[in-house]
Image (cartoon, rainbow, N blue to C red):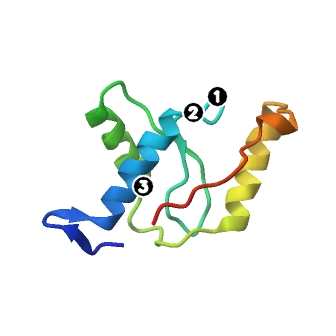
Amino acid sequence: MFDEVSPGIKAIEVSQALGLLLSQTLADPWKNIMIPFSREAKLIEVKGETLYDRVRSLKQDFSPHEGYDTNFIGVFEEILAVAQFHELNQSELPEMVVVLT
C-alpha cells in the first residue's frame, strides 16, 4: 500500500484520489462519504471546496495509527446505520461498495 507506483507517488495516494473522485459523484446522503482503511469501520465526510481542502480533510480523518485493513462487516453496519437514520428505501441504498487498494 505504501509502495511507490511512480516516483514520489504511493499506491495509497492513488486509492485516496480515486475515492475522492468517486465520492463526489454519489447522491446524498452518500455524496462525499468515504471509508478509510481502518480496523474500526467509520464513514467520513470529505469537506472542502477545493481539491487541496478536500485532500486535507481526508488526511485529517485518516489516521495512520488505526491499521491498514478494512472491517467489512463494520462497513456494512455503518451503511445500514446511515440508511436507517435517513429512512432510506431499498432503491436508495448503495448497489455496491468499491474497494480501492
The mark nearer the N terminus, 3 or 1, is: 1
Mark 3 or 2: the one toward you: 2
- Alpha-carbon span between mark 2 and mark 1: 5 Å
Question: What's under tag 1, amino acid-wise?
Answer: Asp
Question: What's under tag 2, amino acid-wise?
Answer: Lys
Residue 58 on image: x %, y %: 39, 46
Vertical position of residue 66 compared to residue 44: above or below: below
Quarter occupied by residue 99: bottom right
The mark nearer the N terminus, 3 or 2, is: 2
SS class of the residue under badge 1? Answer: loop
- Alpha-carbon span between mark 3 and mark 1: 22 Å
- Residue highlighted by disc 3: 62
Vertical position of residue 54 compared to residue 11: above or below: above
- Return the residue nearer the eye: 15 or 64: 15
- Residue highlighted by disc 2: 31
Compared across the picture, whether 6 is left or right of 20 comes to left
Residue 16 on image: x %, y %: 39, 53
- Alpha-carbon span between mark 3 and mark 2: 18 Å
- Return the residue nearer the eye: 74 or 92: 92
- Residue, far left: 7
Q: Do the residues labelled 2 and 1 touch (CB within 8 Å)?
A: yes
